[in-house]
Amino acid sequence: MAILLQALISGLVLGAVYAVMTVGLTLVYGSLRTMNMAQGSYVMIGGYVAWLAFNSYGISPWIGLVLAAVVAAVFGVLTELSAVRPFVGHKDIDFEMTVYISTLAVTIILSAGALIIFGPRSKAIPPLIPGGFELPGGVVVTWQSVVIMVIALVTLTGLSWFLNSTRHGLSVRAVAQEHDAARLAGIRTVRVYMLTMALAASLAGIAGVLLAPLYFISPVSGDLPLLKGLIVAILAGLGSLRGTIWGALMVGLIEAIVSAYFGVGASLPILFVLIMVVMVLRPNGLFGLPQEERL
Amino acid sequence: MSRRDREVQRQLGWRPLPWLPLLGVTIAAAVVPLVFTDSYIINLLILTLIYATLNQSWNLTIGMVGAWNFAQLGLFAIGGYLAAFVCLRWGISPWFALVVGMLGAAVANVALAIPSMKLRGIYVALLTFSFAEVIRLGIIYDDSGLTGGVFGLSGIPGLFEGLSPEGSRRATYWVVLAVCIGTAILIHRLMRSPFGIAFQALRDSTKYAVSLGISMRTYYVFSTTLSAAFAGLAGGLYAFQYTTISPSVMGLTPLSLLVLMILVGGMGTVTGPIVGTVVVMLLTEVLRGTGEWRMLLLGTILLGILVVQPTGVVRLFDGLFGRIGQWMNAPTEQPAKDADDRADMVEAAPQDQEGVSKAETVRSPGGDSHVG
């Protein structure tokens, strides 16, 4: 019983981090109708920023969180300029797929850059609040888990406020809903693209700092988050933000429970079998909306 | 071939095979191991040919059918691991093991293709990519000893155990060359058959093709299974050539190399992947001295190529001849007299009631962007 409770708790924590990470993917897909495969790299960058701030300047990881968000946002903008903007409106190509590959190229460049700058050895940063407390039944809850949940909640709430109540957030949603009508309404869609990607990247950066004490920071520390993000995206479908959050929680819980009972190596294959089953039954994902095809 | 057949082929864009140059290249390639005895070069060429086969198989789905399938390296690995496994554990002859590897990859692909059939393009890309990653990470985290985990399987016998190292290398080279050329011939024949025409129809104008009764699902499964079989074959050959196979054959780095090869060569042609493979292998050799910077440079080159010419570098040269021809044959300058005449003609065009000249061009609505 204790194992199950422990797994549930870590599942929720994982799910929360995945939610923060993957919401960015959904945002970008909604606005630009393409996948940003560099999302994992921003997680890695966030981790490195926090590590650099802490290690070299003694800056607390709390501030590192904010720094990571900012730096990741910068990289998001750079990605947009180099890997997305050149293809917007290009007639001869399949936009979706070309950007898929170009953002893959960006991931490689960023990983290689991290390897050159920081070297191949993993880095670690201390948890934001060390230690934990014990619940009746022998279940240990680390303060870091609590912090992660709180920060994730705050971030997602902030995002929701931004998207619903601010002018720029509404323009992001407008572009996602109906691209041409947004342009007619005077929204500069290309600027919205940049904003969306910067936002998505900063979210991933935050997730990177949250994940860093759990999984070490290395040039390839973006690979696994990207894969998890893709799994969540496929499972939940790329249509709705709320669906993505639920999907992230589901994936986190399944991963934690499977890991607890069957070992760490089993969670990925089982997750994959699960999404294959979901794909057969609901090709648009559990919460996905059947997308109208761009003609 | 009747005149009508020739006309149809011309309209389809089929150009007759340049037999003589191809034969010459084949003979030159076959003679290479007799002329160059440096083992490093021969091994490099063997690797190039293996990748060329892999890229051709990938081209079958991504270039010919237009299905965005990123599982290729996973199938490559499945073929290799399976062939290695049955050879090591059960002592099956390497040749037979190759076939087992092919079948295994094909079967794995069918399992993957069934959910992929109904999915939209981007989901297929994500699903297949995840498939390859899950296989890679699944092997890395495998403690059971079946797959050897991070270190992979080793001690795999070569294809020609009885021969001297040099003889074995040469024989392997010729086998791999034969496989590569055989694959090319097969794919070429396939694309010229009714199957191939159906593939291209699905790629260029999916809805129209489906409305004509060409089922995307059947052809997708068929093309990906065939592609998987060849990928598995390439994987098996890889395993027997290097006597080890490990998860490092998969992952973003090899994938980016493959993507680069296919982009440079251009998708959708038979020779494209081969040319792309050769060029990129040369590039990696040239960049070998740069150490850590290699992947950074490769990634930047990939991005650069995409931005400059997303449809493939070979296409760049394709149009070059045409453009040079246009430039050389450009009409001489019109004297001013003609310009005046044309202006008069526009003035004289009948105006309709709203005052809009009928000579104004009509814009075509929307626009199907598939150029094929």
Image: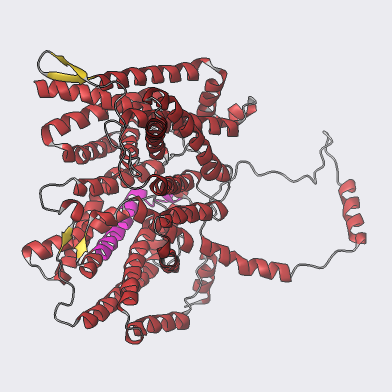
Q: Nearer the viewer, residue A238 or A43?
A: A43
Residue found at x 57% / y 45%: A86
Q: Is residue A103 above or below residue A62?
A: below
Residue found at x 10% / y 21%: A2
Q: Quadrant of the N terminus of chain A?
A: top left
In the image as oriented, which residue stretches furthest toward the left?
B90
Q: Position of residue A79 (x, y in %)?
A: 50, 41
Q: Nearer the viewer, residue A63 or B284?
A: A63
Q: Nearer the viewer, residue B95 or A197?
A: A197
Quadrant housing residue B50: bottom left
Tell me if residue B247 can be seen.
yes
In the image as oriented, which residue stretches furthest toward the top?
A136
Residue A255 covered by magenta stretch:
no
Q: Is residue B307 above or below residue A64?
A: below
Q: Position of residue A279 (x, y in %)?
A: 29, 37
Q: Left or right: B135 with respect to B324?
A: left
Q: Position of residue B352 (x, y in %)?
A: 83, 38
Q: Is residue B368 above or below residue B328?
A: above
Residue found at x 56% / y 47%: B368
Please provide the residue range marked out in magenta. Answer: B209-235
Q: Position of residue B97 (x, y in %)?
A: 15, 66
Residue found at x 29% / y 73%: B176
Q: Nearer the viewer, residue B250 or A271?
A: B250
Tell me if residue A286 can be seen.
no
Tell me which secondary structure the magenta stretch mostly adopts.
helix
In the image as oriented, which residue stretches furthest toward the front?
A57
- The colour style of the image is secondary structure
Quadrant housing residue B189: bottom left
Residue B229 covered by magenta stretch:
yes
